[in-house]
Image: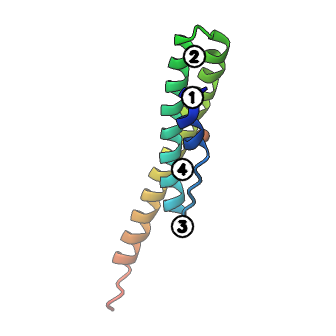
C-alpha cells in the first residue's frame, strides 16, 4: 500500500477557520482536495482492476462533489450578504 501513503496524509489534515467566511473557504479547499484524492484513488483502483473499490470511490466522489457545490453556494451567499450589508451601511448616511 505504498502508493496510498500520500492519500492518508491528505485525509489526516485538519484546518479550521476562526470566522465563517474563512471556514467556508477552507471547507471548499478541503472538498476540492477530496475530489482530487478520490479521482486519483479511482484511477488507481481501475489500474488494479478492482471495480468494487472503484465503484465505492465513485460514490464517495459524488458526495465530495455535492459538498464542494454546497460550500461554493455558501461562499456566494456570504459574499452577497456582505455586499448587501456594505451597501446598506454606505447608503444610511453615517456622515449626517
Ligand atoms: Fe467532503
Circle 2 sits in a helix, a strand or a loop, which is it? helix
Sooner in the amino-acid sequence: mark 2 or mark 1: 1
| Residue drawn where x is 55% and y is 24% of the image | 41
The Cα–Cα distance between marks 3 and 1, rounded to whole angstroms, is: 37 Å
Q: Are marks 4 and 1 in contact (CB under 8 Å)?
A: no
| Pointer 1 residue | 2
- From the viewer's perspective, is the residue at label 3 or at label 1 nearer? 1
Q: Which residue is mark 3?
A: 19
Residue reaching furthest to the top: 49
Is residue 60 at all visible to an observer of this figure?
yes
Q: CA distance from mark 4 to mark 1?
A: 28 Å
Within 10 Å of disc 3 (Cα), the crowding (few <14, some 14-19, many 20+) is few
In the displayed structure image, the side of residue 77 where residue 91 appears, left or right: left
Residue bearing mark 4: 27
Q: Position of residue 36 (x, y in %)?
A: 48, 32
Residue contact between numbered discs 3 and 4, judged by CB atoms under 8 Å: no
Q: Earlier in the sequence, mark 3 or mark 1?
A: 1
**Quarter of the C terminus within the rendering:** bottom left
Which residue is located at x 50 percent, y 18 percent?
43
Residue 69 shows up from this direction = no
Mark 1: secondary structure: helix
Crowd class of label 2 (few under 14; some 14 to 19; many from 20; radius 10 Å): some
Q: Which residue is mark 2?
A: 45
Label 4 CB sits under 8 Å from any ligand 1 atom: no
Amino acid at each position: 500500500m505504498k502508493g496510498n501513503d500520500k492519500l492518508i496524509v491528505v485525509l489526516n489534515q485538519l484546518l479550521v477557520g476562526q470566522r465563517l467566511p474563512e471556514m467556508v473557504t477552507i471547507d471548499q479547499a478541503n472538498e476540492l482536495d477530496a475530489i482530487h484524492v478520490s479521482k486519483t484513488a479511482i484511477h488507481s483502483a481501475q489500474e488494479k482492476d478492482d471495480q468494487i473499490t472503484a465503484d465505492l470511490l465513485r460514490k464517495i466522489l459524488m458526495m465530495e462533489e455535492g459538498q464542494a457545490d454546497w460550500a461554493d453556494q455558501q461562499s456566494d451567499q456570504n459574499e452577497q450578504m456582505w455586499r448587501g450589508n456594505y451597501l446598506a451601511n454606505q447608503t444610511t448616511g453615517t456622515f449626517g
